[in-house]
């Protein structure tokens, strides 16, 4: 009797769940259809949505967004651009002004509408101390549904990599979907790090040291990778920013016929024409990037500390060196990270040789490029490395991590064709810095000239031409 009751309850709950899901599906479809009908009554243009919840962040991903928007507006007259953003504190004009100030990209405000998302907090990493990837992915579905219900587009572009929203816009919104993937949410490299029990920003020390927790995390990662593969392949056109990202996406999503490698747009034309400013005896090492944990700013500070050790007998040279750390902060968490790095600078006794500049304008950034001799980039498995390319275009001698985009796409280290340097750890970076400092002027100039000549393939014009070629079938 008890067994029959349990079976009946199971059948009831299963039936209820099935009908609730079915009801939800048809209700959302009806709401979206009604909303789209209302939009088309007032505006017959093609509605092109760009899903970029952090469009006002001022990083390399935002340059991709605004260059893509500009290219669509230039090519197609009868389109309206919809930007889905969670930057509720900024007005549309403020956001477009930042695009102009940060990237020198000017857009027609009359053809762009911003849809503000109120639930962006559900994709913030700090919301999920455990199972962060899954939590953020479910959170992205929440704001994806909010975006779809507020303004269903005809064509949907995801320029941030929130793959879990693709089924929503495909099955509920009946949209054509294209994505620009800067890096996979999960990768085989992440799995290997967990499997090898390597402590990192995405694998805490107590998990790395515990065999059972490591096993649990591996199972979780593999299940998540299966889900990520399922949702990702729902896009109709997939653009990836580097060979490294392409390899991982092909391995995960397994749709090579829809996958295109499209290097992100870099401001190379203007930067290649910059003239170096005379800074006297001062030697400036410049790093440019958002203040995020994966950018590994502490490694740069440790590298400078090791350089001081190498220059122990050359105090005059050490006194000339300054590390200029330039970047943007998205929120209070990033601001706290900057504070912690300033504390680390003092702990390493580097405060006289390090300067932080946060959220500076494009013109100020240009002045930084003109004053620096060396560029520094420390992120492990950087998906591409826009700042690496732009430093090279500006005439800086670049040192980047021996992994990801800088290794596979950007920097050549072979003798006779060298365009920069690659390093792995703090001591490696310090040796590269010392090599550049003690090189002859002719040796450094040869590397600089080759680097500047190599970056044309990463220009904004090249990006826009290739982007339009890939998405043109969507507008036919």
Image (spheres, rainbow, N blue to C red):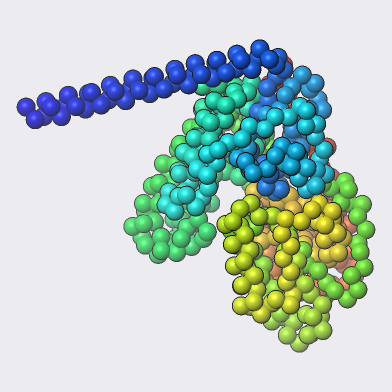
- Asked if one can make out residue 71 in the rendered structure from this viewpoint, the answer is no
Decide which of 322, 433 is in the foreground and name it.
322
Q: Quadrant of the N terminus?
A: top left
Decide which of 436, 178 is in the foreground and name it.
178
- Asked if one can make out residue 29 in the rendered structure from this viewpoint, the answer is yes
Which residue is most to the bottom? 313
Q: Position of residue 176 (x, y in %)?
A: 62, 22
Q: Position of residue 466 (x, y in %)?
A: 76, 32
Q: Position of residue 131 (x, y in %)?
A: 43, 49
| Residue 248 falls left or right of residue 269 | left
Please give the name of the residue rendered at 81% of the width and 25% of the height, measured from the top-left corner: 75
Please give the name of the residue rendered at 52% of the width and 39% of the height, measured from the top-left corner: 119
Query: Which picture quadrant has residue 148?
Result: top right
Query: Which picture quadrant has residue 433?
Result: bottom right
Q: Quadrant of the C terminus?
A: top right
| Residue 443 falls left or right of residue 7 | right
């Amino acid at each position: 009797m008890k067994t029959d009751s349990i079976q009946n309850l199971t059948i009831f709950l299963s039936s209820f769940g099935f009908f609730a899901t079915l009801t939800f599906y048809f209700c959302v479809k009806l709401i979206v259809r009604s909303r789209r009908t209302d939009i088309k009554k007032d505006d017959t243009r093609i509605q092109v949505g760009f899903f970029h919840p952090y469009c006002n962040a001022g990083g390399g991903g935002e340059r991709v967004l605004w260059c893509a928007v500009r290219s669509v507006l230039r090519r197609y007259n009868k389109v309206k651009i919809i930007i889905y953003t969670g930057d509720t504190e900024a007005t549309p004009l403020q956001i477009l002004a930042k695009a102009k100030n940060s990237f020198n990209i000017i857009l027609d405000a009359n053809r762009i509408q911003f849809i503000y998302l109120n639930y962006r907090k559900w994709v913030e990493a700090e919301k999920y101390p455990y199972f962060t990837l899954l939590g953020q992915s479910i959170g992205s579905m929440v704001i994806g549904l909010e975006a779809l219900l507020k303004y269903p587009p005809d064509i949907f572009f995801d320029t941030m990599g929130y793959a879990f929203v693709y089924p929503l816009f495909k099955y509920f919104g009946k949209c054509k979907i294209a994505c620009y993937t800067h890096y996979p949410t999960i990768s085989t490299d992440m799995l290997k790090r967990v499997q090898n029990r390597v402590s990192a920003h995405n694998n805490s020390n107590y998990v790395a040291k515990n065999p059972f927790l490591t096993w649990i995390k591996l199972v979780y990662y593999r299940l998540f990778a299966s889900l990520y593969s399922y949702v990702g392949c729902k896009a109709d056109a997939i653009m990836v920013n580097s060979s490294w990202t392409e390899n991982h996406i092909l391995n995960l999503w397994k749709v090579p016929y829809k996958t295109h490698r499209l290097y992100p747009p870099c401001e190379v034309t203007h930067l290649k024409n910059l003239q170096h400013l005379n800074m006297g005896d001062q030697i400036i090492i410049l790093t440019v990037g958002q203040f995020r944990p994966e950018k590994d700013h502490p490694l740069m500070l440790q590298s400078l500390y090791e350089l001081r050790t190498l220059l122990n007998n050359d105090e005059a040279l050490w006194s000339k060196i300054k590390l200029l750390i330039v970047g943007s902060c998205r929120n209070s968490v990033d601001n706290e990270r900057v504070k912690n790095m300033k504390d680390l600078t003092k702990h390493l006794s580097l405060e006289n040789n390090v300067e932080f500049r946060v959220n500076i304008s494009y013109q100020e950034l240009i002045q930084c490029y003109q004053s620096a001799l060396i560029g520094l980039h420390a992120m492990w498995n950087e998906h591409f490395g826009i700042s690496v390319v732009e430093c090279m275009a500006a005439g800086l001698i670049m040192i980047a991590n021996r992994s990801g985009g800088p290794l596979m796409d950007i920097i050549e280290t072979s003798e006779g064709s060298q365009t920069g340097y690659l390093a792995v750890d703090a001591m490696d970076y310090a040796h590269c810095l010392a090599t550049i400092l003690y090189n002859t002027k002719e040796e450094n100039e040869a590397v600089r000239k080759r680097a500047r000549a190599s970056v044309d393939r990463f220009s904004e014009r090249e990006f826009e031409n290739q982007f339009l070629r890939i998405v043109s079938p969507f507008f036919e």
